[in-house]
Amino acid sequence: MRKAATRKVVLAAVLLLAAGAGACGAPEGPKTPTDTGPVPAKPGKAITLNVLDVAGNLQLTQGMIDDFVAKNKDQVERVTYSKATAPELVGKIKAQQNANRVDIDLVLTGVDGLAAGVDQSLWTAVDKSRLTGMSDYLPGAAEMQKLAGDFGVTITYYPSGPLIEYLPVKVPSPPKSAEELLAYAKANPGAVQYARPSNSGPGRTFLMGLPYLLGDSDPKDPVNGWAKTWAYLAELNKYVTLYPSSTSETMKNLANGSAKIIASTTGWDINPRVLGTVPKEAQVGTLQGFHWVTDAHYAVIPRGVPADKQAAVLNLLAHMLTPEQQAKAYDKGYFYPGPAIKDVPLSMAPSDSQQALAEFGRPEYEKLIADNPLEVPLDAKSLVAAFDRWDREIGGAKVKK
């Protein structure tokens, strides 16, 4: 990936990451794009829709978009897709806005790109009255939507983690609590691994999930409420030899045996096994005191997109929030479950999704999701503070370059 009510609340979190990946000083704000005028019900003529994905979201939603385009040739003549990383997003959009020539009409992003863009005033407020599907959000997805305020639309959702993942042949008796995980790490230096939190969904989820596991005084306040968490991470750090810079590296390390237990999530458990990156027999577990820390993907519209194009985008988003289209979000477990709205059972998903999840899914997830609390991630300011402290005091010196 979150609880302040104002739009700005929405997590400037990964703005810190974007800044670290680019220039040192605070960037100049974008010029105000030309007034786009009122948004009509439909575009006056079919448009070319340019979609940028910075979250891997197209794996879940490209089928939804293509279906809309096929059925609405009077609105969208063609669609182009491009991909970038979240840290690249701000610079890409700001450059277009400063030139008063916005060529990207729709951005698919995680909490990171959403947050950075809200902080920099890059996104257009969305007329949510035209998106009736939002009234059908799952409770967790509705909470994630609050983070976006008026500047984004939750299109896919999952409870995430934190989970631990391991190969039973290597770890026949996995830890059942945070204390047991620490004891295992101490007895097996280098065997426990999680990626740098600011670069990894499972790493970030592990970081935000620990205060619940440890019974910290305020799980939403990493500055004043995480005394147990910071002490635990410092102790665990003694037995961690490196922190990979991406989640995929931890998965490969689990498969090759250089890591025995890694931080994971539902999607990162299922999809790498479907793809063969991780052996099928890998197992996952929760630790005592477990709470889910949720995650979502968002659709955002850059400021400066012409009104006709905004009309097509809003109609597209309304299409994407129908049960029939949401069922495609099951994919092959990438963001499991994936749908953001209610009453979208797996039986509605495409046959290849049903087959993949029948073979690689975990029946226990349904009960785990139903029986454990759902928590939204930290708000912007808090998440930035947590990332910064982790980098300075815990694992920054051991991050794999």
Image (cartoon, rainbow, N blue to C red):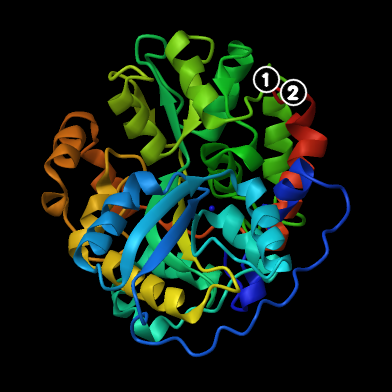
The amino acid on which the numbered mark 1 sits, given as a three-letter code, is: Leu
Residue at the image point whose x is 63% and y is 52% from the top: 89
Residue 96 on image: x %, y %: 66, 62
- Residue marked by disc 1: 242
Residue 376 on image: x %, y %: 51, 60
Residue at the far front: name it.
45
Residue 331 to residue 184: above or below: below
Residue at the image point whose x is 75% and y is 73% from the top: 31
Residue 352 disc label: none
> Please, what secondary structure does the residue beneath circle 1 have?
loop
Mark 1–mark 2 CB contact (< 8 Å)? yes
Q: Nearer the viewer, residue 149 or 138?
A: 149
The amino acid on which the numbered mark 2 sits, given as a three-letter code, is: Lys
Residue 32 on image: x %, y %: 71, 77
Residue 232 to residue 236: above or below: below
Residue 119 seen anywhere in this rendered image of the structure: yes
- Residue marked by disc 2: 398
Label 2 packing within 10 angstroms: few (<14), some (14-19), many (20+): some
Residue at the far bottom: name it.
38
41 with respect to 145 (left or right): left
